[in-house]
Image (cartoon, rainbow, N blue to C red):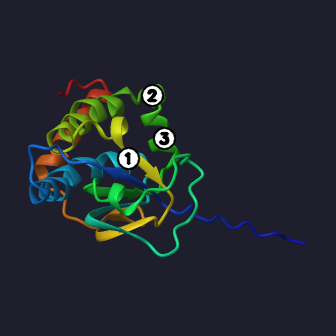
Amino acid sequence: MSSTTTTTTPAPSQALLKRNPSLTPQQFSTHWYEKHAQLIVPFFLHCGVEYYAQIHAPLHFSPSPSPSPSSSSPPLSAEELAAWDGAAEAHLSEGLLAVLGGGSGQGQEWVMDYYREVVLVDELRFLVSNAGAHMRVLGAGSVGGETKVVIEGGKSVIEVGEAAWRVWREYEKRGRGEGGI
């Protein structure tokens, strides 16, 4: 008798984000999608992220969100939700969780360097603080808005410019001990 194992991909988590107050909502949305997505795609793909989308304000509650095992926060009111400018939605891969937890592994320090020196630096341009310092994690499908899918099925669905890939490759060189940035 044979048994078949099926793997189900967990529903994506959502994390509410607040914009840098020096930016208008439109400037925030433009920067997040047109600039930050360019920087995050190589990093997320390297870490094995299968799905990443940006949900732009105005945000609204979805009819039947999934419960979030990672959120112990009380539910939000509509007034509280209105204070947030967007929500990142992603399947959190083991590779991404390892890097964000500081355990990128031997020979992978360059990935954490890229995250700290490129991704976090950019987050401070358009977010109120780095995402990890202020985000509020919600269950999958908790909020909706204008959804812009960036990665689907482990592939980028946006065009990532050569300049972004050039920076990523410089960090890869650093990881191989070939110099780089």
Which label sits in the foreground, 1 or 2? 2
Quarter-wise, where is residue 33 in the image? bottom left
In three-dimensional space, the C-alpha distance between marks 3 and 1, rounded to whole angstroms, equals: 12 Å
In three-dimensional space, the C-alpha distance between marks 1 and 2, rounded to whole angstroms, equals: 15 Å
Residue labelled with disc 1: 46
Point 25% across, 33% down: residue: 171
Q: Which mark is residue 4?
A: none
Does label 3 or label 1 sit earlier along the sequence?
1
**Is residue 145 shown above or below 35?**
below
Does label 2 or label 3 sit earlier along the sequence?
3
| Closest to the observer, 124 or 76 | 76
Q: Residue type at mark 1? A: His
Q: Residue type at mark 2? A: Gly
Residue labelled with disc 2: 102
In three-dimensional space, the C-alpha distance between marks 2 and 3, rounded to whole angstroms, equals: 9 Å
Residue labelled with disc 3: 97
